[in-house]
Image (cartoon, rainbow, N blue to C red):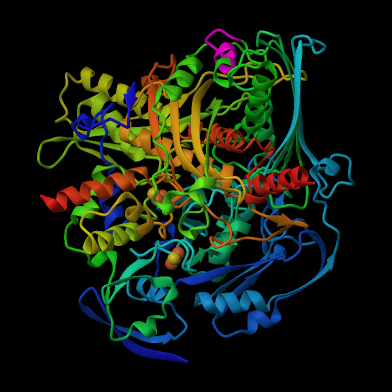
Amino acid sequence: MTDTSTRERADRVVGHGLGTSAPRPDGTPKVRGQFAFSSDLWADEMLWGRTVRSPHPSARIVRVDTTVAEAMAGVHAVLTAADVPGRATYGLEHTDQPVFASDVVRYHGEAVAVVAADHPETARRAAAAVVVDYDVADPLVDPEAAIDAIPIHPDGNVFRHVRIVHGDPDAAGDVVVEGAYEVGMQDQAFLGPESGLAIPAEDGGVDLYISTQWLHVDRDQVAACLNLEPERVRLTLSGVGGAFGAREDVSLQVHLCLLALATGRPVKMLYSREESFFGHVHRHPARMTYRHHATRTGDLVKVEARLVLDGGAYASSSTAVIANASCFAAGPYRVPNAVIDGWAVRTNNPPCGAMRGFGAVQACFGHESQMDRLAAALGMDPVDLRLRNALRTGDVLPTGQRITGVAPVRECIEAAVAHPLPPPAADDPLERPGGAGLTVDSADVRRGVGFAVGFKNLLYSEGFDDYSTAAVRLELAADGEPVATVHCAAAEVGQGFVTLAQQVVRSELGVERVVLRTADTGVGSAGSTSASRQTWMSGGAVQAACEAVKIALAARGGDLSAGPIEELREHHHRPTSPLDERGQGDAHVSYAFAAHRAVVDVDPGLGLVRVVQIATGQDIGRALNPLAVIGQIEGGIAQGVGLAVMEEVLVADGCIQNPSFTDYLIPTALDMPAVAATLIEQPEPGAPFGAKGVGEAPTISSTPAVVAAIRAATGVELARVPVRAADIAMPQAASRGAAQT
Amino acid sequence: MNETYGLRINGRDEQVREAWLGESLLYVLRERLGLPGSKNACEQGECGSCSVFCDGVLVNACCLLAADAVDAEVTTVEGLGAGSTPVQRAFLDEGAVQCGFCTPGLVMAVTDLLQRTSDPSETELREAISGNLCRCTGYGRIFAAVRAAQQGDAQ
Ligand code: FES
Ligand code: FES
């Protein structure tokens, strides 16, 4: 176990193999401003693209007139649906989203046209000059109503209904608690906006330099829409300024390539922050109702849940998100009987898809709120109740799947609560809730402590053939020293796969010098940088390629002087199966668990909250790079805290109200609590190096832990995240009013 | 409307030719002068990723017209030094860099802080970088980097 609160610098072993906090190979260019992000790209004769977007969430397009825009000086192309040579739609799992809307628009911000011009300001003006006449319709914005409403898309309004029936659906417990919970729409808010550069190629194809999470799935979608063979659409990863799920779907990829091919010139696009809020999917808002049954002594008997996720206008990854939300709806507990209904539906709200935690986040807010309610009903300590029901290896999930890997839920809980509680608030007014606003009197501040546990699957599930590819070449450099070169298409989005790839090669081949080729579609797919999968999948592929190189080298008697050795390997994880009609099946490969204890200070009258500390125990298998693991844990907690108390894309009648960093708030250095983390290292059987992905677990239960702490400080039942000041202050005001009358 | 004017960036005189006067300093640095180190996460003064020094004062380059920086001495992240400064090294050593999009702006903000005060309190430190958003790190390793840079400076 590693306690980061006391860890010393001297622990950071040098040598840079696995298990060390090896430095990032891209670190020096990043700190010097020399690292090329996709927004930094530049080419001679480059044009700027700009998207024309619908101001309405639901409307029929009557007419699109591009003549004025086309006639403007400096404008080189204006393209609409009529200019798409190939498939008119794209999508991650279902191709239901038009490249450009042509007959109807289904969400606020849907693309209708693109322009290319010689200056971004000219492009902006040209986009504004494209005339689109709309026949505006009432948007369908209620996800419950959407289930039975007239379909707003030929593919229907229900993306997927998952029903899990496990054990005896009629089982009942002595104690029953019910609750209804809501999760608002969160944005990934990566810092580097969507951007890329497309360059037309001499073979009639196109080269696209892009920030994405999965080059090959982008390539296939782009090629289909362009009606080109995939070989003529070559993608190269450029610097990615964060992802968190928002770069899984195509945004400007097809538009950029269309413009480059239409103009014969390199074209760059860069979304503004405002456009970024319209240009990518968000975390699904959720409405959830739960009923938990338990014995008097606190053993869970049955969990009933109904989850409705609003997928917005297009499918994106909704079908997989609802499967996750449903599979993990009961939490990391032994639940012998369960009836879970999960719905992901289509509305005229902004499209939703992948975000860190992927369905487990929403469900965790529900099941953990329920566990606290159950503990209160039983008169039990909330931590004891969780320990009593904690999953262990060998237990069976509501999907009927037995957990064969490590499941240190108990250890995560015990580690989180073992951290010392923070001292009482100092007298510095800046450290009170509300901070620099100086609105809070210290006499009004109350402290609360809350607790939550969560889990989710690692890697792709439900029968998906999930794999990664890596090539490793070993040779003698000009100076006679061995050098290894890795070619892998895994998208580095900030998580540190580039560091890990070097560490793997150093440990496997004993070679200090490791060169990484740029990730591109010139090598096989590495799969997506999502689902906490690259350490396992691409780390596994690099390891397998190294093994093959070692064998080839041994066959040569260890002599490299005869020339380079290059081996290419794929790593596939063990097969999984789809869920059957009762939601049963061995759908998942492995799970990561984490527990969080939150300490908050609250001014109940003003509804202001300061999150003081998050203590966590996290199941990581093995720390391959301890410093990188800590970075993932702290960063993930920041996003969980954000969802708990500040982050929400506000949508009114289908329209986004706050598409800016002025109005969509993410945690700043002043909002971030202290983090005390314990890494639980129990190697996962079957995982390369025994390591589990660490990126998502920190985001899952940190949110409900914070909300539980606010409840503890105020006594207010909070059934929705993010918790707004009024949610705390108004019930207080109401009860004060009632007491006075 | 297009004009030609001079700027002084990182100790060098630069000519901005035939440029629209509505362009921000950030745009001119990035797109006209080949200095993309200053980043553009919001272009509305909210994220600090475009932080530069203008006559020694930390400013958001996205909120300043380039034409207003005529006669000013502008320093960008590219102009901090030939090698890495103690602040930049501390960011590397302490794991303060993930995607790195916020990093140049944070390096500028921390450089500014440590120039103004050699031993900032916890609150001063948090305040000083609260205008620089980072979505990856949760700031913990950035705080550690500031403390390490401070010690490095002291040695
Ligand atoms: S880009 Fe200037 S503050 Fe965000
Ligand atoms: S490292 Fe990615 S935004 Fe800070």
Q: Judge whether residue A291 can be spotted in this image.
A: yes
Query: Is residue A245 at least partly visible in the picture?
Result: no
Q: Is residue A690 left or right of residue A581?
A: left
Point out the image quarter for the N terminus of chain A: top left
Q: Residue at x 55, y 32 (%)?
A: A705
Q: Nearer the viewer, residue A403 or A89?
A: A403
Pick the front one: A218 or A131: A131
Residue A495 in the image, given as x and y percentages of width and height: 40, 40
Q: Pinpoint residue A606: horizontal percent, then vertical percent.
A: 60, 51
Q: Is residue A333 left or right of residue A340?
A: left
Measured as percent of width and height from the top left, residue A681 is found at 38, 19
Seen as rendered, the residue at the extreme front is A740
Nearer to me, A264 or A179: A179
In this rendering, position of residue A111 left or right of residue B77: right
Q: Which residues are magenta?
A: A385-395
Give the answer, above or below, for where A309 lies relative to B99. above
Residue situated in front as seen by the camera: A550 or A493: A493
Q: Is residue A459 magenta?
A: no
Q: Using residue A737 as the reference point, say whether residue A723 is left or right of it.
A: left
Q: Quadrant of residue B56?
A: bottom left
x, y (%) of residue A73? 57, 85
- Which residue shows up at 63% across the image and 15% down it? A397
Residue A495 lies, with reference to residue A210, above or below; the image says above
- Count of residue discs: 0
Q: Is residue B71 above or below residue A607?
A: below
